[in-house]
Image: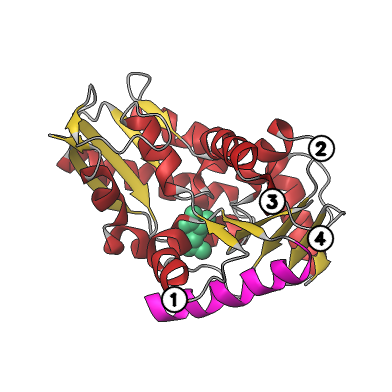
Amino acid sequence: MAVGVFDSGLGGLTVLDAAAQRLPDVPFVYLGDNAHAPYGVRTADDIFNLTCAAVERLWAEGCDLVILACNTASAAALKRMQETWVPKDKRVLGVFVPLIEALTERQWGDNSPPREVAVKHVALFATPATVASRAFQRELAFRAIGVDVEAQPCGGVVDAIEQGDEILAEALVRSHVEALKRRMPQPEAAILGCTHYPLMAAAFQEALGPGVKVYSQANLVAESLADYLTRRPEFLGPGQQSKFLTTGDAKSVSSKATQFLRRQITFEKA
Ligand code: DGL
């Protein structure tokens, strides 16, 4: 009854942690494509091909349902995968919609017309590929009107995290927040639209100031997964064992994951 969780690298561990806490009886198989991270600077075709290969690997582990715990893959590849590639007996879900539902105060499956919401000025921090896809603005427009979104492509942050360079990641976060604030001096809410960024949540909050509500995806996605599995328990696959897989070097990925999450995590080669 395992569920697969995929990210280009370490970021999806933030989602995995929240999902494992919310669903303690479900085994999770995590796959980080660390050999090919970051995805945020790749073309949409490249992201599609890499994501399909990773999802197939998770299906082979007995995970019929795979969460793309990666905004870049969710933004650049998921729609095409669902429309052209995923067979009927499998599911691949992304991380965008639960976040937008929280921001727009909607329940799952509420397909009523877009309406005014409390938050008017939203800062979006994401990878260059996610920002270029405009997927966030598209999904938001289905649900809300009158929301001004200013998007900041945060080049370099995922790379610094994947390399285990916390100091560089913090410095880059500060400079990206400053760049955004020059265009939108007073955002009411900030979206961490990349699953790596919760690892830098304190740096984002400090640079943004205490008045800005920072939304990150981990708990929202975990809640929405629990809800999905209650409605569709048939997508709990036959896999039995939790494990961490990487396409990169298992030893160095384990040590960086342990450093960022501050608990021991041991990866095996995918
Ligand atoms: N964690 C991925 C995301 O949510 C990072 C993408 C990347 O590899 O650049 O977008």
Q: Which residue is mark 3?
A: 234
Residue at (16, 42) in percent of width and height: 183
Report helix, strand or loop for mark 4: loop
Q: Which residue is mark 1?
A: 84
Residue depicted at x 70% and y 42%? 261
Circle 4 or circle 3, nearest the eye: 3
Residue 208: percent from left, percent from top: 34, 30
**What is the spatial separation of the Cα atoms under label 4 and label 2, in whole angstroms?**
21 Å
Circle 2 Cα neighbour tier, 10 Å, few/some/many (<14 / 14–19 / ≥20): few
Q: Secondary structure at mark 3?
A: helix
Check disc 1 and give the amino acid type: Thr
Depth order, front residue of 121/52 = 52
Label 1, label 2: how many angstroms apart (C-alpha)? Answer: 32 Å
**Taking 60 as reference, is 190 above or below it?**
above
Q: Is residue 173 magenta?
A: no
Lower position in the chain sequence, tag 1 or tag 2: 2
Please give the residue where the numbered disc 2 appears in the rendered image.
25
Sooner in the amino-acid sequence: mark 3 or mark 2: 2
Amino acid type assigned to the residue bearing label 4 in the image: Phe
Residue in view at x 43 percent, y 66 percent: 40
